[in-house]
Image (cartoon, grey):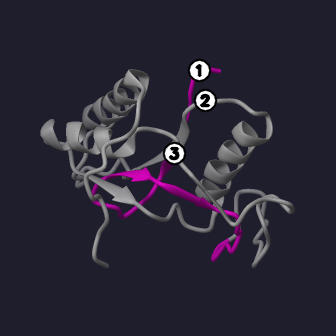
Amino acid sequence: PCRRLALGLAAGTEAVRLERVGVNLRDARIPDNDGAQPADEPVVASGEGALFSTLRLKAALARIREAGIPVHLSLSAGSFVCNDVLYALLHDLSARGLDVPGGFVHVPDLRDPQSPVSLAQAVEAVELLLAETLRGGADSSVPGGALH
């Protein structure tokens, strides 16, 4: 693969969320679709505590904001299925020695008529993220953290 990007639903969120960190922890507050509800388990038994997205998130954040799309840089993909996907994706790339950008994006519930992000905006945000990642090079060093 030349890059890997996974998408997930974050119901109740007000913006596209560019996920920065996958944590090696499963701690589900509700069961998944198969009824599993892990508590305090690693995603990968021998894995590192956390892995970071290798997409150009900060550069993409600026471009997506310029397009007028609600977007945030997120430091937590949660501790449920989306975090599992992000962590496993990054772990797999590392374990296989692949120098391939990878990461995860959360989108609001686009079926909700009150969603602050439309389907077209979500698609555009993903396109901008991929375009920035394809440019290559180091990510922007502009601070992107939040106070919360």
From the viewer's side, name the closer residue of 71 and 143. 143
Q: Name the residue under label 3.
A: 104
* Label 1 crowd (10 A; few <14 / some 14-19 / many >=20): few
| Kind of residue sitting beneath label 2 | Val
User: Does residue 111 appear left or right of residue 103 in this picture?
Assistant: left
Q: Give the range drawn in magenta.
A: 1-30
| Quarter of the view holding residue 66 | top left
Q: Judge from the rendering whether residue 100 lies leftward or rightward of residue 70; answer left or right.
A: right
* Label 2 to label 1: alpha-carbon separation: 6 Å
Determine which residue is flagged by label 1: 2
- From this view, report whether residue 6 is shown above or below residue 18: above
Q: Is mark 1 on a helix, strand or loop?
A: loop
Q: How far apart are marks 3 and 2 (CA)?
A: 14 Å
74 or 6, nearer to the observer: 74
Quadrant showing the N terminus:
top right
Q: Please name the amino acid that badge 3 sits on.
A: Phe
